[in-house]
Amino acid sequence: MLSGSLVSLGLDKNNFDLLMEIYEKALNQTFDTLMQVKSGLSKIYNYEVINNISKRIKTPESIINKMEKKHYEVSFKNIIDNIDDVAGIRIACPVKGDIYSVIDIIKKLPNIEVIEMKDYIAKPKKSGYSGYHLIIQTPVEIDDQKVPVKVEIQVRTMAMDFWATNEHKVRYKSEKKLSKLDSKKLTAYAKLINIIDDKIMEIYHKQELA
């Protein structure tokens, strides 16, 4: 069914699979690098500066839906040029202050070039979502050539990660449309989580100065 859909959109399945393999290679090598960062930070600070790192590749259906939603012609070129989150990594930190420490390290990592940054901590989204997003490029070896491949990295607190994961499920993964009232509730909960994050960070700072 999917193979037929790809063909009808002008995408050869074998070439599509090859493109996904390239994204997966970029994803895995970036993930491995970040896991090393996680381990190193734990040894230096004696606590988990990074609590968790997860990774995912967008499904073909999700890629096509996003392209159609953004009114892009479905083509390999437009996937590569315009869909920045085909490969994605999420990093969860205990508190907001840790996020900026992790971002500073990512910027200095070899084989990673930051090409775009969005700070939703300083300026949360209308939904209340808070986090820091990076679009990076990492070189992937293909036929003895190194090709830069984009990976999106999202860094947020554990509390906001909990909210964002569940907000995505109820808003986008459910067949039933979210009511305006429940949408407002989710926004209010996000704002509350941001307040809690700030209060916990204040306690962290007091302990550091004690």
Image (cartoon, grey):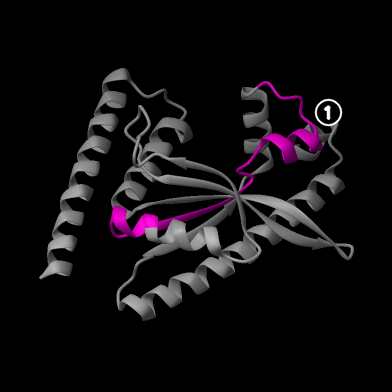
Magenta region, residue range: 71-100
Kindly identify the amino acid type of the residue bearing the numbered disc 1. Answer: Ser
Question: In which quadrant is the N terminus drawn?
Answer: top right
- Left/right placement of residue 59 relative to residue 47 reads right
Q: Which residue is mark 1?
A: 8
Outermost residue, left direction?
Answer: 210
Q: Nearer the viewer, residue 50 or 4?
A: 50
Residue shown at 31% from the left, 25% from the top: 183
Based on the picture, tell me whether residue 126 belongs to the magenta stretch: no
Residue shown at 43% from the left, 46% from the top: 132
Structural crowding at the residue carrying mark 1, measured as other residues with C-alpha within 10 Å and reported as few (<14), some (14–19) or many (≥20): few
Q: Position of residue 120 (x, y in %)?
A: 39, 39
Q: Quadrant of residue 30?
A: bottom right
Residue shown at 35% from the left, 67% from the top: 49
- Left/right placement of residue 149 relative to residue 77 reads left
Residue shown at 76% from the left, 24% from the top: 73
Q: Quadrant of residue 193?
A: top left
